[in-house]
Amino acid sequence: MSFVKLSVADFRPAQPPGDEQVAEFLAQHEQEVRKYYDDNSDRYHKPRQVQLAHVFFEVRPEYDSEQVQEKKEQAEISLDNLKKKASFEEEAKEYSEDDATKDKGGKLPLSTREALVARWGEKFAQAVFDLEEGQLSGVVRSDKGFHVVKCLKVIAAEDHSFDEVKKDIARQLLLDRQARQAARREAERLLAGLHSGKSLEELLGNEPDKKTKQDQDERKAGQPRVRDTGLFARLGAYIPGLGMDQDVARAAFSLSMDKPVPDKVFPIGGSGPNAAFVVFKLVKRQDPDMKQYPQAKERIRKMLLSRRRPAQLAAWLKQARHQADIQANQAFLADITPPGMRGRS
Protein backbone atom coordinates (compact mmCIF):
# COMPACT_ATOMS: atom_id res chain seq x y z
CA MET A 1 0.00 0.00 0.00
CA SER A 2 1.05 3.63 -0.43
CA PHE A 3 0.69 5.85 2.60
CA VAL A 4 1.35 9.24 4.12
CA LYS A 5 2.23 9.62 7.78
CA LEU A 6 1.36 13.04 9.21
CA SER A 7 3.27 13.74 12.41
CA VAL A 8 1.24 15.80 14.87
CA ALA A 9 4.40 17.64 15.95
CA ASP A 10 4.71 19.11 12.43
CA PHE A 11 1.35 20.83 12.80
CA ARG A 12 2.05 22.81 15.95
CA PRO A 13 1.01 26.45 15.49
CA ALA A 14 3.86 28.88 14.88
CA GLN A 15 2.40 31.23 17.48
CA PRO A 16 1.43 29.92 20.93
CA PRO A 17 -2.14 30.57 22.07
CA GLY A 18 -2.78 33.89 23.77
CA ASP A 19 -3.57 34.39 27.44
CA GLU A 20 -7.32 34.67 26.82
CA GLN A 21 -7.39 31.37 24.93
CA VAL A 22 -5.37 29.72 27.69
CA ALA A 23 -7.66 31.07 30.40
CA GLU A 24 -10.73 29.82 28.55
CA PHE A 25 -9.17 26.39 28.00
CA LEU A 26 -8.17 26.17 31.66
CA ALA A 27 -11.67 27.06 32.82
CA GLN A 28 -13.17 24.33 30.63
CA HIS A 29 -10.53 21.64 31.17
CA GLU A 30 -9.12 22.17 34.66
CA GLN A 31 -9.60 18.50 35.53
CA GLU A 32 -7.52 17.48 32.49
CA VAL A 33 -4.84 20.01 33.44
CA ARG A 34 -4.80 18.70 37.02
CA LYS A 35 -4.46 15.11 35.78
CA TYR A 36 -1.47 16.08 33.63
CA TYR A 37 0.12 17.74 36.67
CA ASP A 38 -0.42 14.65 38.83
CA ASP A 39 0.73 12.21 36.13
CA ASN A 40 3.94 14.19 35.55
CA SER A 41 4.75 15.10 39.14
CA ASP A 42 8.45 14.40 38.60
CA ARG A 43 8.59 17.44 36.30
CA TYR A 44 7.29 19.75 38.99
CA HIS A 45 8.83 18.24 42.12
CA LYS A 46 12.57 17.74 41.66
CA PRO A 47 14.88 16.98 44.60
CA ARG A 48 18.22 18.69 45.13
CA GLN A 49 21.02 17.01 43.21
CA VAL A 50 24.76 17.27 43.61
CA GLN A 51 27.74 16.19 41.58
CA LEU A 52 30.68 15.22 43.72
CA ALA A 53 34.22 14.05 43.19
CA HIS A 54 36.09 11.97 45.74
CA VAL A 55 39.45 10.50 46.58
CA PHE A 56 38.57 7.12 48.05
CA PHE A 57 40.50 4.82 50.36
CA GLU A 58 38.87 1.41 50.69
CA VAL A 59 38.35 -0.35 54.01
CA ARG A 60 37.59 -4.02 53.53
CA PRO A 61 35.56 -6.06 56.06
CA GLU A 62 38.57 -8.19 56.99
CA TYR A 63 40.81 -5.22 57.89
CA ASP A 64 41.99 -4.97 61.50
CA SER A 65 42.10 -1.70 63.42
CA GLU A 66 45.67 -0.99 62.39
CA GLN A 67 44.84 -1.32 58.70
CA VAL A 68 41.77 0.88 59.12
CA GLN A 69 43.88 3.54 60.83
CA GLU A 70 46.38 3.38 57.97
CA LYS A 71 43.61 4.10 55.44
CA LYS A 72 42.37 7.00 57.53
CA GLU A 73 45.86 8.49 57.64
CA GLN A 74 46.14 8.19 53.86
CA ALA A 75 42.89 10.14 53.53
CA GLU A 76 44.19 12.80 55.92
CA ILE A 77 47.37 13.17 53.85
CA SER A 78 45.26 13.57 50.71
CA LEU A 79 43.10 16.20 52.42
CA ASP A 80 46.21 18.09 53.50
CA ASN A 81 47.52 18.05 49.91
CA LEU A 82 44.22 19.44 48.63
CA LYS A 83 44.17 22.18 51.24
CA LYS A 84 47.58 23.16 49.90
CA LYS A 85 45.92 23.69 46.50
CA ALA A 86 46.85 20.39 44.90
CA SER A 87 44.71 19.53 41.86
CA PHE A 88 41.75 17.43 43.00
CA GLU A 89 41.61 15.65 39.65
CA GLU A 90 45.29 14.69 39.78
CA GLU A 91 45.02 13.65 43.44
CA ALA A 92 42.16 11.29 42.60
CA LYS A 93 43.92 9.85 39.56
CA GLU A 94 47.04 9.20 41.61
CA TYR A 95 45.67 7.92 44.92
CA SER A 96 41.95 7.05 44.75
CA GLU A 97 41.05 3.37 45.09
CA ASP A 98 37.68 3.72 43.35
CA ASP A 99 38.50 2.15 39.99
CA ALA A 100 35.21 3.33 38.49
CA THR A 101 36.00 7.02 38.95
CA LYS A 102 39.73 7.54 39.49
CA ASP A 103 40.52 7.95 35.78
CA LYS A 104 37.83 10.65 35.64
CA GLY A 105 39.38 12.60 38.48
CA GLY A 106 37.11 10.96 41.05
CA LYS A 107 33.98 12.41 39.46
CA LEU A 108 30.72 10.78 40.60
CA PRO A 109 27.45 11.04 38.64
CA LEU A 110 24.87 13.69 39.43
CA SER A 111 22.98 12.24 42.40
CA THR A 112 20.07 12.76 44.74
CA ARG A 113 20.53 12.14 48.44
CA GLU A 114 18.80 8.78 48.09
CA ALA A 115 21.22 7.73 45.35
CA LEU A 116 24.20 8.60 47.54
CA VAL A 117 22.75 6.58 50.41
CA ALA A 118 22.20 3.60 48.11
CA ARG A 119 25.76 3.74 46.76
CA TRP A 120 27.85 4.81 49.76
CA GLY A 121 25.62 4.65 52.84
CA GLU A 122 23.80 7.06 55.14
CA LYS A 123 26.91 8.40 56.89
CA PHE A 124 28.45 9.45 53.59
CA ALA A 125 25.30 11.19 52.35
CA GLN A 126 24.81 12.99 55.65
CA ALA A 127 28.36 14.30 55.58
CA VAL A 128 28.53 15.55 51.98
CA PHE A 129 25.07 16.21 50.55
CA ASP A 130 24.85 19.78 51.84
CA LEU A 131 28.25 20.87 50.50
CA GLU A 132 28.18 23.96 48.30
CA GLU A 133 29.80 24.20 44.88
CA GLY A 134 33.59 24.19 45.19
CA GLN A 135 33.51 23.23 48.87
CA LEU A 136 35.88 20.57 50.17
CA SER A 137 34.86 18.12 52.89
CA GLY A 138 36.97 16.81 55.70
CA VAL A 139 37.83 13.14 55.88
CA VAL A 140 34.51 11.31 55.57
CA ARG A 141 33.96 7.76 56.84
CA SER A 142 31.44 5.70 54.88
CA ASP A 143 30.33 2.08 54.96
CA LYS A 144 33.08 1.30 52.45
CA GLY A 145 36.05 3.37 53.53
CA PHE A 146 37.36 6.91 53.83
CA HIS A 147 36.74 9.73 51.38
CA VAL A 148 37.84 13.26 50.70
CA VAL A 149 35.04 14.91 48.77
CA LYS A 150 34.66 18.03 46.66
CA CYS A 151 31.32 19.38 45.47
CA LEU A 152 31.47 20.16 41.76
CA LYS A 153 27.87 21.14 41.03
CA VAL A 154 24.57 21.75 42.81
CA ILE A 155 21.13 21.68 41.19
CA ALA A 156 18.65 23.20 43.60
CA ALA A 157 15.41 21.43 44.40
CA GLU A 158 12.30 22.52 42.54
CA ASP A 159 8.80 22.33 43.95
CA HIS A 160 6.10 23.92 41.84
CA SER A 161 2.52 23.98 43.06
CA PHE A 162 -0.41 23.32 40.73
CA ASP A 163 -1.47 26.97 40.84
CA GLU A 164 2.05 28.00 39.88
CA VAL A 165 2.19 25.93 36.69
CA LYS A 166 -1.42 25.35 35.66
CA LYS A 167 -1.38 28.08 33.00
CA ASP A 168 1.79 26.68 31.43
CA ILE A 169 0.28 23.19 31.39
CA ALA A 170 -2.95 24.50 29.88
CA ARG A 171 -0.99 26.30 27.17
CA GLN A 172 0.92 23.10 26.35
CA LEU A 173 -2.22 20.97 26.23
CA LEU A 174 -3.98 23.54 24.07
CA LEU A 175 -1.03 23.60 21.67
CA ASP A 176 -1.07 19.80 21.49
CA ARG A 177 -4.81 19.80 20.85
CA GLN A 178 -4.54 22.41 18.10
CA ALA A 179 -1.72 20.45 16.44
CA ARG A 180 -3.67 17.21 16.63
CA GLN A 181 -6.79 18.83 15.16
CA ALA A 182 -4.76 20.39 12.32
CA ALA A 183 -3.07 17.06 11.54
CA ARG A 184 -6.41 15.26 11.51
CA ARG A 185 -7.94 17.89 9.19
CA GLU A 186 -5.09 17.44 6.73
CA ALA A 187 -5.39 13.65 6.95
CA GLU A 188 -9.12 13.82 6.26
CA ARG A 189 -8.48 16.16 3.31
CA LEU A 190 -6.11 13.60 1.83
CA LEU A 191 -8.58 10.79 2.46
CA ALA A 192 -11.38 12.70 0.73
CA GLY A 193 -9.04 13.32 -2.21
CA LEU A 194 -8.27 9.62 -2.48
CA HIS A 195 -11.98 8.84 -2.55
CA SER A 196 -12.40 11.37 -5.37
CA GLY A 197 -9.88 9.47 -7.49
CA LYS A 198 -6.74 11.56 -6.95
CA SER A 199 -3.39 10.10 -5.93
CA LEU A 200 -1.55 11.00 -2.74
CA GLU A 201 1.21 12.54 -4.86
CA GLU A 202 -1.27 14.84 -6.58
CA LEU A 203 -2.87 15.82 -3.29
CA LEU A 204 0.49 16.70 -1.76
CA GLY A 205 1.86 18.38 -4.87
CA ASN A 206 4.63 15.79 -5.22
CA GLU A 207 5.45 14.46 -8.66
CA PRO A 208 5.37 10.65 -8.61
CA ASP A 209 8.59 10.31 -10.62
CA LYS A 210 10.69 12.42 -8.22
CA LYS A 211 12.54 9.73 -6.35
CA THR A 212 16.19 10.79 -6.38
CA LYS A 213 18.01 11.63 -3.17
CA GLN A 214 18.43 15.22 -4.38
CA ASP A 215 14.67 15.56 -4.76
CA GLN A 216 14.14 14.16 -1.29
CA ASP A 217 16.70 16.51 0.21
CA GLU A 218 14.99 19.48 -1.43
CA ARG A 219 11.73 18.78 0.37
CA LYS A 220 11.02 21.13 3.24
CA ALA A 221 11.63 19.74 6.71
CA GLY A 222 8.47 18.21 8.08
CA GLN A 223 6.73 18.03 4.69
CA PRO A 224 4.94 14.68 4.44
CA ARG A 225 5.94 12.32 1.66
CA VAL A 226 4.30 9.38 0.00
CA ARG A 227 5.83 6.02 0.85
CA ASP A 228 5.23 2.46 -0.26
CA THR A 229 5.17 -0.49 2.11
CA GLY A 230 5.72 -3.16 -0.49
CA LEU A 231 4.00 -6.47 0.13
CA PHE A 232 3.57 -7.51 3.76
CA ALA A 233 1.80 -10.38 5.49
CA ARG A 234 -1.29 -10.26 7.67
CA LEU A 235 0.30 -12.39 10.41
CA GLY A 236 2.10 -10.27 13.00
CA ALA A 237 0.65 -6.90 11.91
CA TYR A 238 4.10 -5.48 11.11
CA ILE A 239 3.87 -2.82 8.40
CA PRO A 240 7.09 -1.65 6.72
CA GLY A 241 7.56 2.06 7.38
CA LEU A 242 4.97 2.13 10.17
CA GLY A 243 5.84 -0.71 12.51
CA MET A 244 3.35 -2.77 14.48
CA ASP A 245 -0.25 -1.56 14.28
CA GLN A 246 -3.16 -3.98 14.48
CA ASP A 247 -5.81 -1.44 13.45
CA VAL A 248 -4.02 -0.33 10.29
CA ALA A 249 -3.11 -3.91 9.33
CA ARG A 250 -6.67 -5.11 9.88
CA ALA A 251 -8.06 -2.26 7.78
CA ALA A 252 -5.50 -2.82 5.01
CA PHE A 253 -6.42 -6.49 4.66
CA SER A 254 -10.12 -5.64 4.53
CA LEU A 255 -9.54 -3.62 1.34
CA SER A 256 -9.72 -4.86 -2.23
CA MET A 257 -8.65 -3.50 -5.59
CA ASP A 258 -12.31 -2.57 -6.15
CA LYS A 259 -12.35 -0.67 -2.83
CA PRO A 260 -8.73 0.35 -2.24
CA VAL A 261 -9.29 3.27 0.18
CA PRO A 262 -10.47 2.91 3.80
CA ASP A 263 -13.35 4.94 5.20
CA LYS A 264 -11.35 6.74 7.88
CA VAL A 265 -7.92 8.01 8.85
CA PHE A 266 -5.92 6.13 11.49
CA PRO A 267 -4.22 7.67 14.53
CA ILE A 268 -0.98 5.96 15.55
CA GLY A 269 1.68 6.55 18.18
CA GLY A 270 -0.67 7.38 21.05
CA SER A 271 -0.78 10.93 22.39
CA GLY A 272 2.95 11.41 22.96
CA PRO A 273 5.72 12.86 20.80
CA ASN A 274 5.29 10.09 18.19
CA ALA A 275 1.60 10.79 17.60
CA ALA A 276 0.61 10.83 13.93
CA PHE A 277 -2.22 10.16 11.48
CA VAL A 278 -1.92 7.71 8.60
CA VAL A 279 -3.74 7.87 5.27
CA PHE A 280 -3.25 4.97 2.88
CA LYS A 281 -4.41 3.27 -0.28
CA LEU A 282 -4.13 -0.33 -1.40
CA VAL A 283 -1.99 -0.55 -4.54
CA LYS A 284 -1.42 -4.30 -4.80
CA ARG A 285 -2.84 -7.42 -3.26
CA GLN A 286 -1.38 -10.88 -3.61
CA ASP A 287 -3.44 -13.84 -2.48
CA PRO A 288 -1.60 -16.78 -0.90
CA ASP A 289 -0.39 -19.57 -3.17
CA MET A 290 -2.11 -22.65 -1.75
CA LYS A 291 0.45 -24.89 -3.46
CA GLN A 292 2.96 -23.66 -0.90
CA TYR A 293 0.66 -24.33 2.05
CA PRO A 294 2.02 -27.83 2.91
CA GLN A 295 5.53 -26.38 3.21
CA ALA A 296 4.39 -23.40 5.28
CA LYS A 297 1.96 -25.31 7.50
CA GLU A 298 4.54 -26.67 9.95
CA ARG A 299 6.32 -23.30 10.22
CA ILE A 300 3.03 -21.54 10.97
CA ARG A 301 2.06 -24.20 13.52
CA LYS A 302 5.36 -23.78 15.40
CA MET A 303 5.04 -20.01 15.39
CA LEU A 304 1.50 -20.15 16.79
CA LEU A 305 2.56 -22.64 19.47
CA SER A 306 5.48 -20.43 20.52
CA ARG A 307 3.06 -17.54 20.98
CA ARG A 308 0.76 -19.65 23.17
CA ARG A 309 3.48 -21.07 25.42
CA PRO A 310 4.01 -17.98 27.66
CA ALA A 311 0.28 -17.82 28.44
CA GLN A 312 0.13 -21.57 29.08
CA LEU A 313 3.16 -21.41 31.38
CA ALA A 314 1.68 -18.49 33.32
CA ALA A 315 -1.60 -20.38 33.77
CA TRP A 316 0.25 -23.51 34.94
CA LEU A 317 2.34 -21.54 37.47
CA LYS A 318 -0.78 -19.85 38.84
CA GLN A 319 -2.51 -23.20 39.28
CA ALA A 320 0.61 -24.78 40.82
CA ARG A 321 0.94 -21.98 43.39
CA HIS A 322 -2.73 -22.32 44.29
CA GLN A 323 -2.50 -26.08 44.77
CA ALA A 324 0.94 -26.16 46.38
CA ASP A 325 1.38 -27.93 49.72
CA ILE A 326 4.72 -26.82 51.15
CA GLN A 327 6.35 -29.23 53.62
CA ALA A 328 9.75 -29.11 55.28
CA ASN A 329 12.18 -31.86 54.21
CA GLN A 330 13.43 -32.84 57.65
CA ALA A 331 16.08 -35.24 56.35
CA PHE A 332 17.60 -32.52 54.19
CA LEU A 333 17.49 -30.00 57.05
CA ALA A 334 19.23 -32.48 59.34
CA ASP A 335 22.03 -32.93 56.80
CA ILE A 336 22.75 -29.20 56.50
CA THR A 337 22.28 -28.21 60.19
CA PRO A 338 25.51 -28.03 62.27
CA PRO A 339 25.54 -30.62 65.10
CA GLY A 340 25.46 -27.99 67.83
CA MET A 341 22.32 -26.40 66.36
CA ARG A 342 20.21 -29.55 66.00
CA GLY A 343 17.19 -29.79 68.22
CA ARG A 344 16.93 -26.00 68.70
CA SER A 345 13.69 -24.31 67.82
Image (cartoon, grey):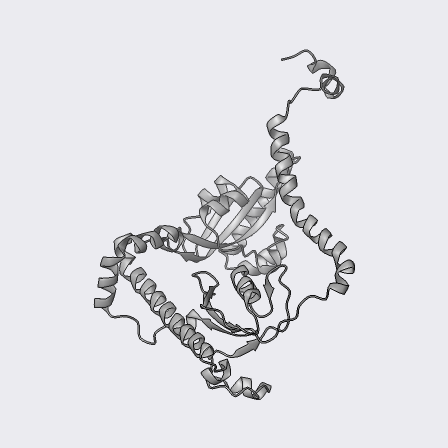
Q: Is 68 located above or below residue 29 in the figure?
A: above
Whether residue 29 sits left or right of residue 319 in the image: it is: left
Residue occupying image coordinates x 61% and y 51% = 98
Asked if residue 279 can be seen in this view, the reply is yes
Dividing the picture into quadrants, the one containing residue 119 is top right
Q: Nearer the viewer, residue 272 or 56?
A: 272
Image coordinates of residue 16 in percent, x first then y, are: 30, 71
Image coordinates of residue 236 in percent, x first then y, are: 62, 59
Image coordinates of residue 76 in percent, x first then y, are: 54, 47
Q: Residue furthest front?
A: 258
Image coordinates of residue 268 in percent, x first then y, are: 48, 64
Q: Nearer the viewer, residue 11 or 184?
A: 184
Whether residue 185 sits left or right of residue 257 in the image: it is: left
Residue occupying image coordinates x 47% and y 82% = 198
Residue occupying image coordinates x 42% and y 51% = 131
Residue occupying image coordinates x 52% and y 51% = 79
Q: Is 75 located above or below residue 287 in the figure?
A: above
Q: Nearer the viewer, residue 182 or 133?
A: 182
Q: Nearer the viewer, residue 208 or 80?
A: 208
Asked if residue 222 can be seen in this view, the reply is no
Quadrant in which the N terminus is drawn: bottom right
Dividing the picture into quadrants, the one containing residue 343 is top right
Q: Is 310 located above or below residue 100 in the figure?
A: above
Count of numbered circles on the image: 0
Q: Is 193 located above or below residue 27 in the figure?
A: below
